[in-house]
Image (spheres, rainbow, N blue to C red):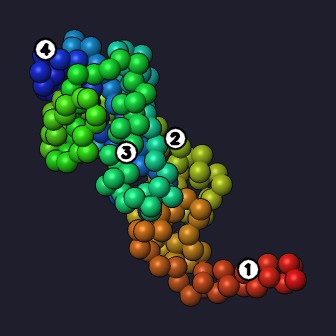
Amino acid sequence: MLRPCFNNLLLEAGCDEAGRGCLAGPVTAAAVVLPRDFYHPLLNDSKQLNEAQREQLRPLIEQEALAWAVAFVDNVEIDRINILKASFKAMHLAVDQLKLRPQLLLIDGNRFSPYFGIPHECVIGGDGKYAAIAAASILAKTHRDAYMQTLHEEHTLYNWKENKGYPTPFHKQQVRLHGHSPYHRLSFKIKPGKAATAEAEAGSMSLAEETE
């Protein structure tokens, strides 16, 4: 059973991220402050739930939470500062948006960049131990999945509606065949194949001819 809190004297926010290992799209983080008596039998680490269960829990968490927020850091920023720093930045941005200021941050994982003025506790496997972190994992995952669905409509050949930007064999194959989209993380090394390179060079030549 998930624990309701780490310190019952402090107002706590659980923080977690989704999309850290993806080839495309943003990294997404959520911060959630739950009532101490919040309970739902399905609440768990988002990775232990199926899509239908996550979607069932999302509106309930958003309605019952004392405060919640979700933030995105896009692929361009990920490439600029690296994925670890981008994950921390997304968590900071989510905490920035909370309508209540927590007194303690519960962070899923073993590392975090301190948030000014609020102490934190890192908990390995925290999304399976504390209710607020589990709730944050669900909001981060569902909000990111919804965003990747909209990006799929722009770039259907990568099948983001199914893989959500994760490095499935099909996704990696499509990058090698067709090259990167504007939403791919270029620092995540999947080299396009010869066909994609030739296509890009042909496009550059055509553009040069049009501008002469």
Q: Which mark is residue 89?
A: 3
Mark 3 and mark 1 residues within 8 Å of each other at the beta carbon: no
Give the mark, 2 or 1, whose residue is nearer the N terminus: 2
Seen in the picture, residue 28 relative to 200 is either above or below; the reply is: above
Separation of residues labelled 4 and 2 (CA atoms): 36 Å
Within 10 Å of the Cα at label 4, are there few (<14), some (14-19), or many (20+) other Cα atoms?
Answer: few
In percent of width and height, residue 136 lies at 32, 32
Give the residue type that dot 3 points to. Lys
| Element type where label 2 sits in the image | helix
Question: Which residue in the protein does label 4 denote?
Answer: 9
Residue on which the image places disc 1: 203
Tell me the residue at 43%/57% (across/down): 78
Name the kind of residue labelled 4 in the image: Leu
Q: Earlier in the sequence, mark 4 or mark 1?
A: 4
Q: Earlier in the sequence, mark 4 or mark 2?
A: 4
Q: Position of residue 93 (x, y in %)?
A: 41, 37
How many angstroms separate mark 3 from mark 1 (CA)? 36 Å
Which residue appears farthest toward the front when viewing the image? 117
Give coordinates of residue 90: x percent, y percent: 39, 42
Q: Which residue was labeled with disc 2?
A: 146
129 to 10, vertically: above or below:
below
Which callout, 3 or 1, points at the residue further toward the start of the chain?
3
Q: In terms of secondary structure, where does tag 1 sit?
A: helix
Name which residue lies at 49% across and 74% down.
173
Precedes in sequence: disc 3 or disc 2? 3
Q: Name the kind of residue labelled 2 in the image.
A: Ala
At label 2, counting other C-alpha atoms closer than 10 Å, the crowd grade (few under 14, some 14-19, many 20 or more) is few
74 relative position to 107: left or right? right
Residue 192 in the image, given as x and y percentages of width and height: 52, 79
Identify the residue at image location x=62%, y=59%. 155
Q: Earlier in the sequence, mark 3 or mark 4?
A: 4
